Amino acid sequence: MNFAINHKNRKKLGIIGGMGSHAGVWLLKRITELSYAQADQEFLDILLHNNSAIPDRTYAILHQKNSPLYELERTISIFNYSEVEVAVLACMTAHYYCDVLASKFSGKLLSAVDLVAQELHSNPHFAGKFKIGLIGSTGLIVSGIYHRILEPLGYNIITLNGLEQEEYFMRPIYGNDGIKAKGIDVSEKVKEQFYHQVSILTMRGAQVIIGACSEIPLVMTCGISVPFIDAFDLLARQTVHYCYNTL
């Protein structure tokens, strides 16, 4: 066996899941795949709380009721009790509550929004590209969490209009046969409907597409003709780096 990698500084990780459950499981699997481990004992110590009691984030943001904060904070309290050192949200829309949750957490809460901003700034692949097509829930878009970070840096955020958002994002995600219900087993028709967002955004001038939804890597894995940042996969990668003390 090769024990060349020093794993003594590994940080204990907590994943706030249940938003939806397929996404939380995907994140756990992806982090495990990316881990710097060659033996059982070198993998990360991970606590996944599949908290399915967390109310829908988009509904809460749009209608100012049924706040998910109580349940999100309950998970944070479990992590604090369990001495978790790093936490991540397995939902992009839930990043709207990052500041409040970070103030309650005794460790480090990683933000996918901040990581995307860093990626756009530091990766030469995105140099000179300031027209950003944003794919995300209606709650994420209305909340403006990406707009507040990226627009002051000179980026122009392009989104779908209201009817398009309902037809090509919300319905494929939330429908009875949608991605939240079916996960990777969703039909090709639903996948095609979801993918159509890319065509609309690129026709409107998007030079980079940000996939800011935790269900995106379940279905959107190829066939994107412009530079693409999967915020959820980026979060997985940077979480591994951070937990092995290399970020």
Image: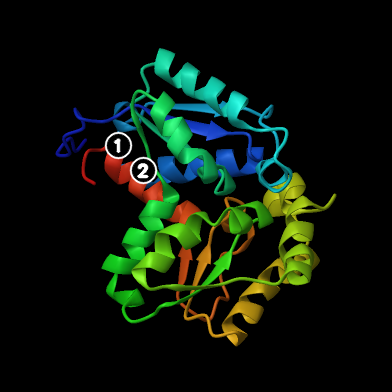
| Quadrant of residue 229 within the rendered picture | bottom left
Q: Would you call the spot at circle 2 few (<14 residues within 10 Å), some (14-19), or many (20 or more)?
A: many
Say left or right for 8 vs 18.
left
According to the picture, the residue beneath numbered tag 1 turns out to be 243
Q: Residue 150: x, y in percent?
A: 41, 64
Q: Provide the residue designation for mark 2.
A: 239
Question: Would you place residue 191 above or below residue 125 in this image?
Answer: above
Q: Is residue 81 left or right of residue 127?
A: right
On-image quarter of the N terminus: top left
The one nearer the camera, 133 or 21, is 133
Residue 125 tag number: none
Q: CA distance from mark 1 to mark 2?
A: 6 Å
Depth order, front residue of 228/147: 147
Q: Contact, CB < 8 Å: mark 1 with mark 2?
A: yes
Q: Amino acid at mark 1?
A: Cys
User: Could one spot residue 37 in this view of the protein?
Assistant: no
Q: How has the structure been colored for display?
A: rainbow
In this rendering, the answer to whether 29 lies above or below 200 is: above
Q: Position of residue 28 (x, y in %)?
A: 49, 38
Q: Residue at 47% of width from left, 81% of height from top?
A: 207
What amino acid type is highlighted by mark number 2? Thr
Q: Secondary structure at mark 2?
A: helix
- Left-right relation of 34 to 214: left
Residue at the limit of the structure toward the right, as seen here:
176
Q: Mark 1 Cα within 10 Å, few/some/many (few <14, many 20+)?
A: many
What residue sits 67% from the left and 57% below the top?
138
Q: Position of residue 56 (x, y in %)?
A: 70, 39
Q: Does residue 235 lie above or below 199 as drawn?
A: above
Residue situated in front as seen by the camera: 60 or 174 = 60
Residue 239: percent from left, percent from top:
36, 43
For mark 1, give the secondary structure.
helix
